[in-house]
């Protein structure tokens, strides 16, 4: 299964959780996020999928991978995204998806994705209406950076209408 095949089921899953979604990894829409102040060895990064929840001004970023051998690289990217978005997920094809305990310890969600659907293997969004998270954060989120990301994504989504 190729990475691009996972975009649509993830997009639908996020939309079912009230996110407006921008698929960026397929070059449908470029979203270049400057990170030079966070990681001086990189000027910018491009997430695979990013979404915003307008009612709460929260962002979600999903990093998609098909090769389990790249798990440390994916976790590294996601830890950087954790500084910019409230919700961060790793997505693997469902048949390769394993419940790694490290995701729970780091506050990362895990999505198992087939051609038809995405399933939350490691949950990070509470199903209750309390707005609480299901995981404990290891480091603080930079809320001002998240707001910048929300504004940037909102602007791109508005121009697509």
Image (tube, rainbow, N blue to C red):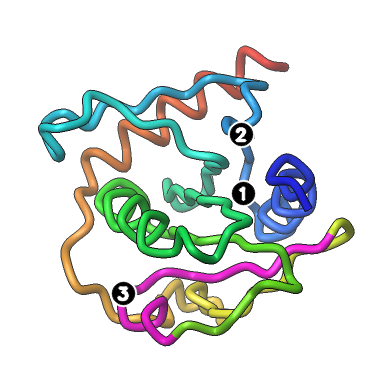
Q: Can you say which quadrant of the picture contains the C terminus?
A: top right
Q: Residue at x 42, y 46 (%)?
A: 57
**Figure check: 158 above or below 23:** above
**Dots 3 and 1: beta carbons under 8 Å?**
no
The segment highlighted magenta reads 101-114
- The picture places residue 111, in percent across and down from the top left corner, at 62, 67
What is the spatial separation of the Cα atoms under label 2 and label 1, in whole angstroms?
Answer: 10 Å
Inter-mark Cα distance, 3 to 1: 22 Å
52 displayed left or right of 85: right
Instruction: Give the image quarter of residue 103.
Output: bottom left
Element class at badge 1: loop
Q: Is residue 47 left or right of residue 51?
A: left
- Point out the residue furthest to the top here: 159
Q: Which residue is mark 3?
A: 106
* Residue to which mark 1 is pinned: 19
Q: Which mark is residue 122?
A: none
Q: What residue sits right under mark 2 in the picture?
A: 22
Q: Compared to 21, does 124 lie above or below?
A: below
Residue 113 in magenta stretch: yes
Q: Quadrant of residue 128?
A: bottom right
Closest to the camera, between mark 3 and mark 1, is: 3
Q: Position of residue 130 (x, y in %)?
A: 47, 78
Q: Earlier in the sequence, mark 3 or mark 1?
A: 1
Q: Is residue 60 left or right of residue 28?
A: left
């Amino acid at each position: 299964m190729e990475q691009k095949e996972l975009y649509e089921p993830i997009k639908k899953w996020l939309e079912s959780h009230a996110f407006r979604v921008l698929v960026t990894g397929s070059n449908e829409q470029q979203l270049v996020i400057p990170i030079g102040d966070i990681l001086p060895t990189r000027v910018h990064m491009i997430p695979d999928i990013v979404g915003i929840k307008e009612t709460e001004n929260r962002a979600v970023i999903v990093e998609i991978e098909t090769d389990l051998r790249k798990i440390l690289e994916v976790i590294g990217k996601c830890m950087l995204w954790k500084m910019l978005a409230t919700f961060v997920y790793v997505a693997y094809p469902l048949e390769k998806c394993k419940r790694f305990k490290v995701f729970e310890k780091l506050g990362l969600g895990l999505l198992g994705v087939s051609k038809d659907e995405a399933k939350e293997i490691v949950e990070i969004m509470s199903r209750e209406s309390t707005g609480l998270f299901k995981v404990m954060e290891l480091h603080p989120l930079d809320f001002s950076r998240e707001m910048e990301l929300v504004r940037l994504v909102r602007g791109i989504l508005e121009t697509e209408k």
